Amino acid sequence: QVQPVESGGGLVQAGGSLSVSCAASGRAFSSYAMGWFRQAPGKEREFVAAINWSGDRPYYADSVKGRFTISRDNAKNTVLLQMNSLKPEDTAVYYCAGRRGSSTYYHTTDYDYWGQGTQVTVSS
């Protein structure tokens, strides 16, 4: 199994950029699909981006497509979410998640392992 740990959140002005990183402990990281989700106050957790085990099939929510980029480094057991052109509505706690599998997954129920989350706040 993997244990994701997020880092890199913070405060940024609208239009700015920020990256959040996920370090996953455990063996066989390259056999895990990884995803990013977010949850704003009073809202349900929602899908942001996901990537398959080899990194060649990223998938994005429509709300972030063209602004966010997900990538992974299997040698370092890390997943990165680069966020550009940030908007106040991107403010949320961002969670990294993992599951075994060869595809790209975008439902919260698809994932077995979750991090504790990191806060991203975008000011207007």
Image (cartoon, rainbow, N blue to C red):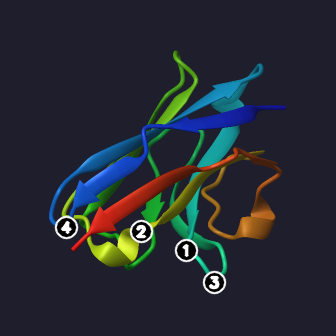
The answer to whether the residue labelled 1 contacts the one labelled 2, judged by CB atoms less than 8 Å apart, is: yes
Residue 51: % across, % down: 52, 50
Count of numbered marks: 4
Q: Residue at x 77, y 19 (%)?
A: 27
What secondary structure is marked by label 4? loop
Q: Residue at x 46, y 52 (%)?
A: 57
Give the quarter of the figure containing the N terminus. Answer: top right
Q: Residue at x 83, y 51 (%)?
A: 112
Amino acid type, mark 3:
Gly
Q: Which residue is mark 1?
A: 40
Q: Earlier in the sequence, mark 2 or mark 3?
A: 3
Mark linked to residue 91: 2
Mark linked to residue 53: none
The answer to whether the residue labelled 3 contacts the one labelled 1, judged by CB atoms less than 8 Å apart, is: yes
Residue 46: % across, % down: 59, 74
Q: Earlier in the sequence, mark 1 or mark 4?
A: 4
Residue 76: % across, % down: 52, 17
- 36 or 121: which is nearer to us? 121
Vertical arrangement, residue 87 with respect to residue 71, above or below? below
Q: CA distance from mark 4 to mark 2?
A: 10 Å
- 122 or 104: which is nearer to us? 122
Q: Which residue is mark 3?
A: 42
- 71 or 84: which is nearer to us? 84
Give the quarter of the figure containing the C terminus. Answer: bottom left
What secondary structure is marked by label 1? loop
Vertical arrangement, residue 78 with respect to residue 48, above or below? above
Amino acid type, mark 2:
Thr
Q: Residues within 10 Å of mark 1 (few under 14, many from 20)?
A: some
Q: Residues within 10 Å of mark 4 (few under 14, many from 20)?
A: some
Q: Residues within 10 Å of mark 2 (few under 14, many from 20)?
A: many
Q: Which residue is mark 4?
A: 14
Amino acid type, mark 1:
Ala
